[in-house]
Image (tube, rainbow, N blue to C red):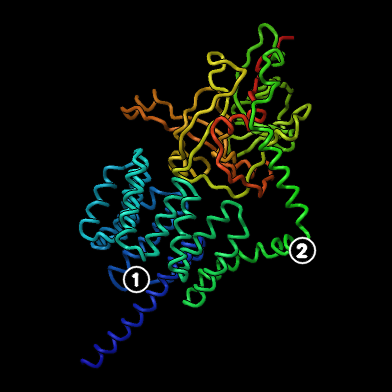
Amino acid sequence: MSKYVAIILINFFFISLSHADEFKNVEQYISVNKYSLALQTLKKISPQNKEEVARQSYLIGEIYFALGNVTKAEDFFSDANMKSPMNGTYGSAYAKAMMALGKFNEAKELATRILEEDFNVIESHIVLATIDERLGNLNKAKNRFEELIRLQPQSEIMHVAYAEFLDVRVNSYDAINLLKKYIKRYPESPKALDYLGNTYAYLDDIENAIIYRSKAAELYELRGQQIYSNSINEWLSEYEKKTKAIEEDNKNEIVEEEIVEEEIVTQTQKPALKYQDPNLIDPWPIKSGEYAYTGSGFITSKGGEIITNRHVIEGAKRLYVRNGLGELRAAEILKLSETDDIALLKLDEPFNSEFSIEIPINYPAKPGQEAFVIGYPLADILGENKPSITQGIISKSTGMYDDPNTFQITAKLNQGNSGGPIFTREGNILGIAVAKIDKTLMLQEEGMIPEDVNFGIPSNRIEALTGKASEKIYSQDLDLEVLYESVLPSVVMILNVVNVQE
């Protein structure tokens, strides 16, 4: 009898080992954004015990969270936490989901309780630091990470976690400096090397991105972490031709790009003189008795087209746009999105092509990132000659009910802001303003008034409509007055004439 028990235990041991490898593969697939492969691998696992059931729920939750379905993720994280309440990782994931849904007090209470039992659960420290930052206590959040690093100066996970926090919520260059100091002491750290390379890639510094990610791929290969290694090698192969071209015959193009960028920077250091003269502002060609309403937008496609919201131009009999320099153009509808509140207008006469704003390719809206909305709100009260700028952050990468095609910002929006561009501090387009929560309706239905809940449409949805995007990404932080002056000629007020007097 004992012989059969031993055989069963041996089989169970090997099955558990096999599942452990499969679970690790799932975690790696999620980490490199291969969610379909992660889910396929999970489906093949038949959990043998309660702990494996909990781990499976946790990983399904991670997939949902990565895809922006936080409510669904919260359900799976909760299930994992209930099945394995002593596992701090599962509890921290549950706290992370609650925090993303705005349940700060519950998330903070759970994360604090986890750390009281095990101070080394880095995920709970991240939750608490993120809550601190979102409540305006950035220094407190940074001090938390710095104290952890002081206690564990050799920890790669801790340094990467802090670098990610700095990258998303403070400044990419602070993250780079942190990781470079760490790698100088611990050069055989693939996660640190990989994140450093990714950060350089985000800043469009492909040369450094390739150097650090290549080294990370080699180390992952040596450690047998093939999924990580393959993912980096796939990324490297995409840039192989581009790198060769730069080395062989692209020097002139690089010089030309640098000159163009320098011209743009020089041009935008001072307000255009034309803008200083109010007599040069073209008047709206609207007749007595005609009714019109306004919105905002921006110039694109070499000066010949305008991006705005679909609802801004609905019912239009005539359309006009005027930029921040006071220059007027007539416009007509070129294309409307069937799925998003986005419209593309064609101008009767292009603006200066230098005023055109390009849509950056694959440029995500990150929670905690600064966001600046520029447009023409309440034009009948605040005036229509100059656009307004409002400052905030991206508070959530999804919109109402976790809609992935919108994101939440704290920058103020008012009537007339619709369709206006949302910029980063560097001058890159994050998306366009679209809506704010109806406070009166929320008070009637929910009995509360939300603050600073406004929404934008991400740039990738604009790309989906226009089919155009650029690999050029600006990486230099601008003072706000310089940012405003830089984009002033590019932001337009839109006049939608909805009834025409014959």
- Image quarter of residue 205: bottom right
Q: Are marks 1 and 2 in contact (CB under 8 Å)?
A: no
Residue at x-position 74% and y-position 50% = 255
How many numbered callouts? 2
Mark closer to the chain start, 1 or 2: 1
State the residue position of label 1. Answer: 47
SS class of the residue under badge 1?
Answer: loop
Q: Count neighbours of disc 2 (C-alpha within 10 A) and say few if under 14, some if 14 to 19, many if 20 or more.
A: few
Q: Nearer the viewer, residue 9 or 224?
A: 224
Q: Count neighbours of disc 1 (C-alpha within 10 A) and say few if under 14, some if 14 to 19, many if 20 or more.
A: some
Residue 482, placed above or below residue 8: above
Q: Say what amino acid the circle numbered 1 marks.
A: Pro
Q: In which quarter of the image is the C terminus?
A: top right
Residue 328, placed above or below residue 59: above
Residue 278, placed above or below residue 339: above
Residue 248, numbered label: 2
Q: Say what amino acid the circle numbered 2 marks.
A: Glu
Instruction: Give percent across and percent down for residue 231.
Output: 55, 66
Instruction: Give percent across and percent down for residue 428.
Output: 59, 41
Instruction: Give percent across and percent down for residue 78.
Output: 30, 54
- Image quarter of residue 327: top right
Q: Can residue 373 be seen in this view?
A: yes
Residue at x-position 75% and y-position 48% = 256
Q: Which of 133 and 477 is in front in this view?
A: 477
- Image quarter of residue 464: top right
| 4 sits to left or right of 156 | left
| 128 sits to left or right of 477 | left
Q: In which quarter of the image is the N terminus?
A: bottom left
Q: Nearer the viewer, residue 327 or 56?
A: 327
Please state which of the two labelled residues, at mark 1 or mark 2, is closer to the viewer.
Answer: 2
